[in-house]
Structure formats: C-alpha cells, structure tokens
Image (spheres, rainbow, N blue to C red):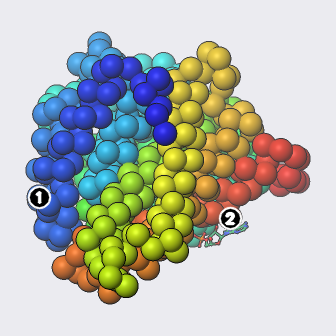
Amino acid sequence: MNLEHLLSKEDLQIRDTIREFTKKEIIPRTKELESDYSLVEEVHQKLVDMGVQSDGYPAEYGGGGHSSMTTLGIICEELAKGDAGISYSVGINAGIILEPAVLVKNKAVMDRFIPLFCKGKLAYACIAMTDEVAGADTENPLLQGRGIRTTARLEGDEYVINGSKAWPGHAGLAEVYLTVCTTDPNAGNEGVALIYVPKDTPGLTFGEPEKKMLFKTAINAAVYYDNVRVPKEFRLAGPGVDNNVYRFATAAPRWHSTSIALGTLERAFEIVLDYTGNRMGGFKPVRQHSIVAGMLADMAVGIEMMRAGFYNLSYMLDHLDVYGPPWSDQFISKTAALGVYASDITVEMVNKGAELLGSMAISEEFPYEKYLRDAKELQLWLGGQQINRYRVARGYYDLKNWS
Ligand SMILES: Cc1cc2nc3c(=O)[nH]c(=O)nc-3n(C[C@H](O)[C@H](O)[C@H](O)COP(=O)(O)OP(=O)(O)OC[C@H]3O[C@@H](n4cnc5c(N)ncnc54)[C@H](O)[C@@H]3O)c2cc1C
C-alpha cells in the first residue's frame, strides 16, 4: 500500500537510513545481540550518534525539536525488522516517557531530565506502571485508578512513594522512572499520580533482570520503592490531569507496540517469501502452489491493513488540534483497536509463515524462530489483550466502570 502521501520528504529519508542501518547492523547479528548486551548498547550508541535519541526532544534543551509520532513510528517499525527489543528501547528513550511533561509544560521535570537525553550519549528512560501484586489491574480502565497499589503521600514539599513494579523496561539502567502511583486508592481517578523519580533517589532499588524467551535484547526488572522521596514538582500536574495523561499513557504504548508488530511481521514475510521462492516442493517453488499463495496473501493483507491503521493513527497523534485530546474514550478506543488487531494478526501470521518454512521455522541456524518468539509479547503486555478489548469497547458503549 502506498502511504507515501502521509510521509514528509525527511521522513522518507529517515526511513531509508534506518532501513539500511537495520540491514547492516542488526539483521546479520541477531543471535549475537541476543546473547551479549554490550553489543546491544553499541547499536544504541550508534543510533544516538545518528540523532535518533535526541531528535524528538525540544530544541531549547539540545534536542532536534522534531517531535513527530510519524517519524518515531517509522524508526521503530524499521528497527523492529531487525530486533523487537531494540525497537522497544529506542521508542522509550526517544521521548515517550518525557512527552507527558512536555505536553503539560512541567518545567521542573523538563529542566531536570530532558538534557540527559540530548548529550549525545545513550540514556535510558523507564515507565514503571505494572504493580507487582496488582498486575493488569494497574492498567484496567474499568477500575478507574483503584487497581493501582503503589502509593504517593505528600509530606511538606515532597512525595513519599512506596510500592513495587514488575517488569518495567530499563529498570536499573534508566535515568528517570515515570512512576504510576495513587495518592488514595479510594479516590479512584482523582488519586492517580504520575511522578518522575530520578535514578539515584534513596530507597529506589531494582530486581535482577528477568530471564525471558523473547525481547532478549531489552532489560526488564522489578522496581522497588521504600519511602522514596521526590520534590513535589516532579509530579506531572495534579489530580485530574495526571489521570487523563495516565489514560493516554496506557494507550500510547499500543501505538508503539503496533510499530513493533508491523516491523516484525514485515521481516517475517520477507523471510518466508524468499524461502518459499527457492525451496522446491512438487517439482516447483513452494510459493507457486495455490494453497501457499493464499497463505502468503493473508500475511500481506495483515501487513497492509496494519500499516494503513498505523500511519493513520500516527497522523492523528501528530494533529491533536484536529482530532482532540488523546485521552477521550474514542481516541483511546481507536488506539486500543489498532493495538489488539496488530498483536493478534502478527502472532497469527508469523505462525502461519512458520508452517511454510517447515522445520527451518524453529531451527536456531535459521533467522525465523526469533520472530516467532518476539511476536508473542505483543499480546501479553500492557494489561494483555483482555484489558485492551475493554478499552476498545468503552469507545462504543457505557461498559460499566467501578461503582
Ligand atoms: C517484555 C516485557 C516488557 C514490559 N515492559 C513494561 C514496562 O516498560 N513498564 C511496565 O510497567 N510494565 C511492563 N511490562 C509488564 C506488562 O505490561 C504486564 O506483564 C502486563 O500488564 C500484564 O500484567 P501481568 O503479567 O501481571 O498479568 P496478570 O495481571 O496476571 O493477568 C493475567 C491475564 O488475566 C487477564 N486479566 C486480568 N485482569 C482481568 C480482568 N479484570 N478482566 C479480564 N481479564 C483480566 C489479563 O488480560 C491477562 O490475560 C512488560 C512485560 C514484558 C513481558
């Protein structure tokens, strides 16, 4: 599908540059990257040198001043063709975590943290959302903030945070932790507080990196808060606004997740197309059999539909003056709908592609098994597909809230 009309000349150039980078620096080395994190950091540093990390941050802090979801989306899509974990990390570090502070113009947070990402050095950010005990309750919109267990208590000029988070990306590495808390679980949405916590704050500690079968190039670990004190200015905004942004903060990663899904399925399709063009069966290339053509066509349909939805949503996010605040039920429903579709179709189609590779699909000597593994994550995070479907439904009818 030709969507070039939605992309600027600069975006097309960036796409070509990142595509080449992925082909050269990531695709030939996926195995090594999965087993040695220092190599992953080298890749990240090269991307930092190319301006990927700083480009979206405001120019007054040393960033490129080119905040655009379309641009970041293209970058994450292209990187995901090589490695989902690298794409995940780049999206987080390149702006998603500090964007809320820019949106509400929280100067204390911007002054303290944005320069760290614009110095030409790799710097990590983290969103600490999923509570260890509450799991998906933290992200469940029907619970209206009552599922959050990490607490923030105002004492003088500081918030005191207690609780624990499971699986946040970059835990232990990040300079800043956007922490989802509640000032009072009984206050529901009004109690939701988003607080930026600096890395070296006393009482902030981390678990060991999780051992996992997928996204091996990204570090995930628990975050613990034991009377962690931060200046009250590091709270995003206050009651109401924090909840609106949190609603969006639980929806926006689905846009990021879709960019990863798209890159993953595109690369899987390339591999399958190539293999079935060379592998002979019934005295002709496998892909010349009509039953196989139908399966390849299904993979292509998934890519085309996902790409159309993704570029459309990126365009909407870049034009909030036209489409309204991104935390309306309708906006969140659209974001979640794309996320649900993208995750399900990617898992289904990457599995379908595997059938066409026979035993090579699961061989560690062949480049496909990684995409089979990584794709599954897309259905598991951000509250899982069940909570995401609640978000979709709420855009269409009054699916009952907590009452
Ligand atoms: C690679 C990776 C990266 C991650 N990155 C981050 C990150 O950067 N930051 C962060 O905060 N977290 C992160 N997570 C955590 C992730 O978002 C959570 O794992 C996810 O939200 C689900 O929580 P859980 O695993 O505790 O599932 P559970 O809460 O145990 O849920 C299990 C299942 O029950 C379903 N379920 C739960 N409640 C309901 C209900 N009320 N109605 C219907 N179904 C329900 C869920 O949908 C799910 O299918 C990451 C996880 C992984 C694996």
| Mark 1 Cβ and ligand 1 under 8 Å apart | no
* Rendered position, 291 above or below 98: below
Image position, residue 146 (x, y; %): 71, 54
Residue displayed at 18% across by 50% down:
23
For the residues marked 2 and 1, what is the alpha-carbon distance in whole angstroms? 36 Å
Q: For the residue marked with disc 2, what is the amino acid? A: Gln
| Mark 2 Cβ and ligand 1 under 8 Å apart | yes
Say which quarter of the image contains residue 277: bottom left
69 or 179, which lies in front? 69
Image position, residue 148 (x, y; %): 63, 56
Which corner quadrant of the figure contains ligand 1? Answer: bottom right
- In the picture of the structure, the residue carrying the numbered disc 1 is 39
Residue displayed at 57% across by 47% down:
305
- In the picture of the structure, the residue carrying the numbered disc 2 is 386
Residue projecting furthest to the top: 60
87 or 229, which lies in front? 87
Q: Is residue 300 visible?
A: yes
